[in-house]
Amino acid sequence: MRAGEAVHAHLAGDPAAMTRYTSAVDAVRGAYLRNRHTFYRCEQRGPDQPFWHRRHNGPTVLR
């Protein structure tokens, strides 16, 4: 819905509409990555298993 609103505003002449939308999406993505990292770090089962090992020790891209 927000993407549609941003496109509508852009086509109606708002030059910053797409930039605002992109910033909002980036903020949501950053929050998701931080929360995912926090919750995965709380999990302590199977640290020797590849799935959990990657989540505990692998690189996490945070924006």
Image (cartoon, rainbow, N blue to C red):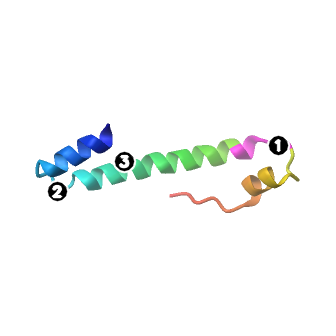
Residue 44 is labelled as 1
* Magenta stretch in the rendered image: 40-45
Does residue 26 appear left or right of residue 38 in this picture?
A: left
Binning the other alpha carbons within 10 Å of mark 2 as few (below 14), some (14 to 19) or many (20 upward) gives few
Q: In what element is the residue under mark 2?
A: loop
Residue for point 51% across, 46% down = 31
The tag earlier along the polypeptide, 2 or 1, is 2
Of all residues shown, which one is farthest toward the top?
1
Q: Are marks 3 and 1 in contact (CB under 8 Å)?
A: no
Q: Amino acid at mark 3?
A: Ala
Residue 24 is labelled as 3
The tag earlier along the polypeptide, 2 or 3, is 2
Does residue 48 appear left or right of residue 43 in this picture?
A: right
Binning the other alpha carbons within 10 Å of mark 3 as few (below 14), some (14 to 19) or many (20 upward) gives few
Is residue 42 located in the magenta-colored stretch of the structure?
Answer: yes
| Residue named by callout 2 | 15
